[in-house]
Structures are given as structure tokens and as C-alpha cells.
Image: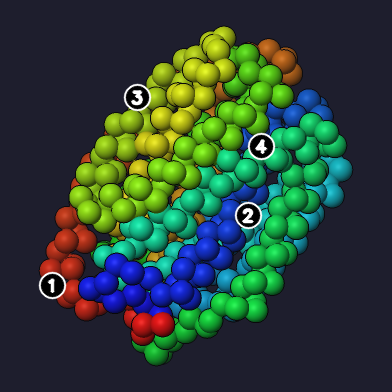
Amino acid sequence: MAASTKSSTFTRYQVFLIVVLAFMQFTVILDFMVMAPLGAILMPALSITPQQFSHVVMGYAIAAGISGLLAAGFADRYDRKKLLLFFYVGFIAGTLFCGLAPTYETLLIARILTGIFGGVVGSVTMAIVTDVFAPQVRGRVMGFVQMAFAMSQAFGIPLGIVLANHFDWHAPFLLIVGFGAVAGVVIFSYMRPVAEHLELQRDITAFRHLINTFFDPRHTMAFLTMMILATGGFMMMPFSSAFLVNNVGVTQEQLPWVFIVVGACTMIIFPVVGKLSDRIGRLPTFIGGTAIAMTTTIIYSRLDLSPLWLVMVINAISFVGIGSRIVSSQALITNIPLARDRGAFSAITASIQQLSGGLAAGLAGFIVIQTTETSPLQHYDMLGIVCSCTMLACVVLMFFVDRQVKRQMAMAPPVMGATSKAA
């Protein structure tokens, strides 16, 4: 199923696979991302503090991180399609629980349950992409698959806010359940097995496979890089809508338009960034994206009452930088593991991201202060500074990852390619 290493064209099945994986990622990302704009509704509806809200976000992330580690040892022992369906069905069940949760306590439990399953879905997706597509085109593929992030911004989150405003905060989760059910049926019915990695497995226990992958010196820098990469993003996101409403003066009715404009711009830029990273290199793309993201983060976190158009412009430019970092880093780091370790490597990477992101969200809850339910957030500018520092640290780490990938590809080019045959 892998694209030829000499060809940049995709087969019809590969196009289908990109679309279905992107849509599935859309539902998983939307489930997490929708918590940010719901913050301004959830906190007064459930009478909870910013710290309690951060616990809801942190609960999902930490649960996802722990489940990713537990699943890593088994990630390369099964057909990736079956593994994907198992965790995706669990994710849909957890999201349904969120849509029915009546209190803060039940919502917290529901988010933890959703995180247990949802946190593994993304890692299995990355392993499938690495198995099926050759390194030379993975930037483009990542650009399309990561469009799920933009789709959640442009369509999912605004629709979720509208539903929450007209009904209540449960409605967006029920919407995700409906989308997820459609994606699950399509994957079950039409996706082909992804199992050729099974022929490369060694006769060792799942626990030993996890330990070997985690402590493999080739993986250390990638794990550290993804940990720092996640930390900055998770700190800003949980309180973004509350910041816009309470500090910047954006109304609940205007909020969906911010996400629509930002998402639409991101949908355009992600495929462009993916293609650009394949042409000029993943590291230069990452550095350029970081420069944009750092600048806009500092500006955004210091906004006070501002016109809607300015908020949209700053957010749109910011997500150009964020998108460049996401796509280029994923395309680069997927080249590191051997084919037999891709599932475990992806699961551990996702786990590290979720755990570090969850801790970052919890830390943000201690930094940000809100004296009343409608008063402005305080110290949000401090989050902007911390995030910018993590972005700068990531550039240094990504430099070493890029050097490592170039050495590996020079020493053993065949090992770095996809393992599947052309579809």
C-alpha cells in the first residue's frame, strides 16, 4: 500500500485512506479542542473555578498518556486496523458519556474514560501513515491528515458553540458521537488491514517491547522534543475562549466566527505547509513556523479590549505558525523508528505529549486567576511568555532530531521507507 519512493502520486485507495483518517482525527481532535470554547459556558454552568476546569482538561490528557504507555507494548502485535477500531469505539463511548454527564464529577470521570481510548487513536493513525506512505511524501500526507485540526476549528468548534448556546454544553459531545459513528462504520467496512509489520516482530513479551522502544537511544531526542512541543500548546488552549470573552471583549455570538475564520485559513495552509516541508526541508519549515508562532503568542496573550477583525487576524497568523510546527515535526519524527517499532514508538510519543500537556494544563490553572465568573483572567500574559520559551527550546531540540534522521537515512535508506507494497 505504500507509495513508491520515487513517485509523489497517490493511488485511489491511498486518497481514500487519507480522507478517512483525517475525518476520524477530526472527531478525536474536536472532542479535545471543543473544551476550550466551552470553558466560558461550562465554568458558570457547573459553578466551577478555572482550576477545576483545568482538571477536566488535565484528566483527559493524563488518562490518554497513561493508556498510551500501557498500549505501546501491544501496538505492533496486532493488525493496525483492528487496534484502531477497538480504541475508536471506546473513544465514542466515552464521548457519549460526556454528552450525558450531569455534574462536574461525572464530567471529570467521562473525560478520563474518553482519554483512555482517544489518546491511543492518534498514535495508531501515525503508525498507519508511516507504514503506508514513503518518507518522501509524508509531509504532504501529514498536511492533509492534520487538516483535521483545521476542520475542527473551521466547522466543528463553531457548530459546537452554536449548539451549546442554543441547547446546552452537552450538545457538542453528542454531535461528535454522531460523526464518530459514521467514521467507525466506514473504517470497518472499507479500510484494508495494515498487518505487514507483524512479519518483522521479535519473539519478546509486550512489556519487553515497550521497555526496548522507550529506552532505545535512537528515540530519546524525539521523545524529549515532543514532550516540550506539547507543553506550550496545552498551556494556552484551555483558557482561550474565556480569555477572548472576558478580556478581549468577544461575545459568545461572535466566538464561532473567530474559529471559522481561523479554521478556514488553517485548512488552506496545512496542505501547503506539508508540501513545503517535503521540498525545502522539515527543519526550515519548523523554524519558520516557530518564529511566527512565538511572535503572535506574545501579542495575543497581551490583548485587552480589541476589535473582532484584529482578533481574527492575529489568531489566523498564529495558526499558520502552529500548523507549520505540527506538520513538519510529525513528518520528521516519523522517520526515526524502525518498521517493527513504529506502533510502540507512536504510542509512547502520543503518551508523552498527552502527559506533558496534561501537566501543563494543570500548571496553567494555577497561573491563571479569575476572581469571579465574569471577571477578566489575570496572568494570561505569563502563559504567553512560558509558551514562547518552550517554542524556542523546541527549535534547538528539533535541530538534533533533524541531524539524527539524516544520519539514519544515509546509513540505511531502505529501513526508513514504508513496509507495505504498492496498492
Cβ–Cβ below 8 Å for labels 2 and 3? no
Q: Earlier in the sequence, mark 3 or mark 4?
A: 4
- Tag nearer the camera, 4 or 2: 4
Secondary structure found at label 4: helix
Q: Is residue 40 above or below residue 6?
A: above
Left or right of 310, for residue 113? right
Q: Which residue is mark 4?
A: 158
Say what amino acid the circle numbered 1 marks. Answer: Met
Query: Which part of the image, by quadrant, shows the C terminus?
Result: bottom left
Q: Which residue is mark 1?
A: 411
**Of the image marks 1 and 4, the number of the one nearer the N terminus:** 4
The mark nearer the N terminus, 1 or 2, is 2
Q: Is residue 17 visible?
A: yes
- What colour scheme governs how the chains and residues are painted in the rendered image of this protein? rainbow
On residue 287, the disc is none
Marks 1 and 3 in Cβ contact (< 8 Å)? no
Q: Which residue is mark 2?
A: 27
Q: Which mark lies nearer to you, 1 or 3?
A: 3
Q: Amino acid at mark 2?
A: Thr
Mark 3 belongs to which amino acid? Thr
- Tell which of 85 and 1 is nearer to you: 1
Q: CA distance from mark 1 to mark 4?
A: 48 Å
Residue under label 3 = 295
Give the CA separation, mark 3 to mark 4. 26 Å
Secondary structure of the residue carrying tag 3 is: helix
Res 42 → quadrant: top right
Residue 274's place in the image compared with 265, above or below, is below
Q: Quadrant of residue 291?
A: top left
Residue 305, position as x, y percentages in the image: 57, 9
x and y percentages locating residue 270 in the rendered image: 41, 47
